[in-house]
Image (cartoon, rainbow, N blue to C red):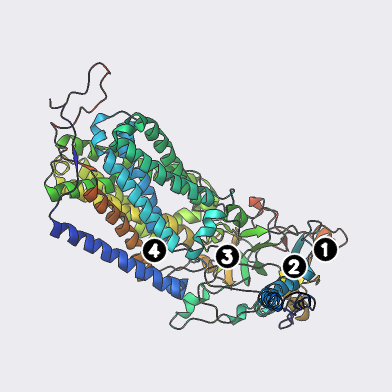
Amino acid sequence: MGKTTEMKDHHEPTDQAADSRPADSSRRAFMGVAAGVTAAVVAPGVVLHSVTAAPRSEAVAGDVRWGLLIDTAKCADGCSACVDACGRENGLDLQSKPEGAAQAHWDDQKAVWIRKVKLRDNQTGRVTNLPMMCQHCEHPPCVDVCPTGASFKRADGIVMVDRHTCIGCRYCMMACPYKARSFIHEVMEDQLTRVPRGKGCVESCNLCVHRRDFGEASTACVDACREAGHEAIVFGDLKDPESTIRLRLAEMASRQIREDLSLNTGVRYSGI
Amino acid sequence: MKRIIYREWRIPPARYWSLLGILASVVGIGALAFAYMEHQGHWVTGMSNSVVWGTPHVFAVFLIISASGALNIASIGTVFRKPLYKPLGRLSGLLSAALLMGGLLVLVLDLGRPERLVVAMTTYNFRSIFAWNIFLYTGFMAIVIAYLWSMADRHGEPYNRPIGIVATFWRLALTTGTGAIFGFLVSRQAYDAAILAPMFVVMSFAYGLAIFMLVLMFSFGEEGRPIGDRILCRLKNLLGIFILGVFYFTLVYHLTKLYGAKNHDLVGWLLLDGGIYTFMFWVGWILVGGLMPLGIIYHPVLSKDRSWIAAACALVIVGGLASMYVIIIGSQAFPMQMFPGHTVLESGFFDGVQGAAAAYRPTIPEVLLGLGGVAVALLVTSVGVRVLQFLPESLADDVLPADEEVSAQQPAGAGA
């Protein structure tokens, strides 16, 4: 099962900044009080910023490119381990149907980062199962069209949304060829600190970006698929010739969905 | 030549204030609809992750392109030197600014985070046609205001034509940009067609002119100001040409799509099996918005009747809204072609299972928000013509200048 509840970015206070400076004894008393009050007011802000910034002080580097390889031959019909794990990891299972909403309509309104799709080849009748999610394109149409630049691509290839600058215009959803993006249609009452979520913004799979920032080696869906005994999804660095994903890609034929668009996706599929 | 005199709209106060009251009420209801959707979130609308732009966008885009088209009349007078159209320039400018205001308001109020408008105004991604449009829209507003000044103020007269030329190009850019919002989307089959940009330009001509003619006929009729047959006939014929233009682009658009085998499903669905979208296309876009007004406009008897001309304009507007519905919502409802040659048997996210189109049903708040935008445009126009001199006193045949430009030595002699 994927890591579900462990929080790694909680805001533990550090020691130095929180301490208010003692007033110099040679100064007058009110100066000391003033300094103390000022420190007390300013310090919490300083502490919060320093704590969150500390473990991620290095900028994301472009010497890696994260990606996924999906072996559809191993993707089991009826299995939803990856979808369930993503829901837990990213707080998607905390969404609740607003009172009065019709179930069928709500199913198309709630946020979904990864979904299972079952296909049949019209000519041969061959049936394929696969998970679909943001394909983390090298040239993402969602990034091109975003008026504010909220939809962006990190140096390590992860495509995601800056929720501070997303105005909720949904143009990225119009532009995405993979229907990978979701809009938050409802007021959120329950959410995870690592995946903040608010009504009126757009979001999508970010390859468990919080795990990347702490150097973990996989995503929730990959872990879940392995634990379910399928190992249909491989996560890794597409730029590293020695990485598992590159070695697998070297030995098996794979393709991109909608290759015709030349987006150079970071998610590759074999067996379709 | 008689001098064209502009005068404020002086219909009886009771009538004026009732009109204003009705418009203000519609604006108020639209505001309440916005407040409701903003407070609850978009789940109360028909929009979803499949159909992400809904009825508000139908109204917003319609109003925005109509705004551009409404300025056509002023351009014809100033840029193309048709003196006959010059007396209509002021109303054309005012209506244009008002329609744009209404359309933008709807667009902004449908944002997921409308309070972040300041972010959209300060943070730009210039690869986005949307970002460019923000400049095109605000610039258009500024240019139209300058244009109005150059028409109304004696000091502005020397600048009238240069500003008019800028306004014409800006207007074309604006509508091209609006069409490109859709035309540049490679992901969806119905979009991904550069022809949408010029098609929007021609649509803007037709819809903007239809709205302009209705406003003109209503405002003149209410106050008993005369409109001569000459000008009305010209406007009517112009509308006919624009409708034919829309037809032409509609035809070429579908032929282009039909040419590629990959789009056969799309065209077949839209023209034959698309349910409400097929209905909207044939009945709304083609019949009501095209064939019926054309029939009136070129009918030997009906085309002389002002009520029928007004009906033709109304039909063009209804057809225009239908065309926007098909283009904006129908194009999203058709499933995205992610796996050509395959049928989607099951999907956890509505990927067109068995080729099914996405569901969308407009909700009342969405419609009310859209109508609120229309009311804003009409309210601004009503106040404008009441307090400022936008409307010529008369458009009677003997008051208006000659149809065509005359040489510099021979000033326009009207009243022939």
Instruction: Report the Cα–Cα distance between label 4 and label 3.
Output: 20 Å
Classify residue A236 as left or right of residue B38: right
Instruction: Report the Cα–Cα distance between label 3 and label 1.
Output: 28 Å
Instruction: Report the Cα–Cα distance between label 2 and label 4.
Output: 38 Å
Expressed as whole percent of the image width and height from the top left, the position of residue B198 reads 44, 41
The residue pinned by badge 3 equals: B343
Residue at position x 13%, y 48% in the image: B223
Secondary element under disc 4, as helix, strand or loop, is loop
Q: Nearer the viewer, residue B284 or A23?
A: A23
Classify residue A247 as left or right of residue A44: right
Task: Tell me which amino acid carries mark 4.
Answer: Gly
Task: Tell me which amino acid carries mark 2.
Answer: Asp
Q: Earlier in the sequence, mark 4 or mark 3?
A: 4
Are the two marked residues, 2 and 4, in contact with CB atoms closer than 8 angstroms?
no
Dot 4 and dot 3 within a common chain = yes
Are the two marked residues, 3 and 1, in contact with CB atoms closer than 8 angstroms?
no
Instruction: Report the Cα–Cα distance between label 1 and label 2.
Output: 10 Å
Q: Nearer the viewer, mark 4 or mark 3?
A: 4
Task: Tell me which amino acid carries mark 1.
Answer: Arg
* Above-or-below relation of A123 to B83: below
Q: Chain of mark 2?
A: A
Q: Nearer the viewer, residue B178 or B196?
A: B178
Secondary element under disc 1, as helix, strand or loop, is helix
Dot 1 and dot 2 within a common chain = yes
The residue pinned by badge 4 equals: B275
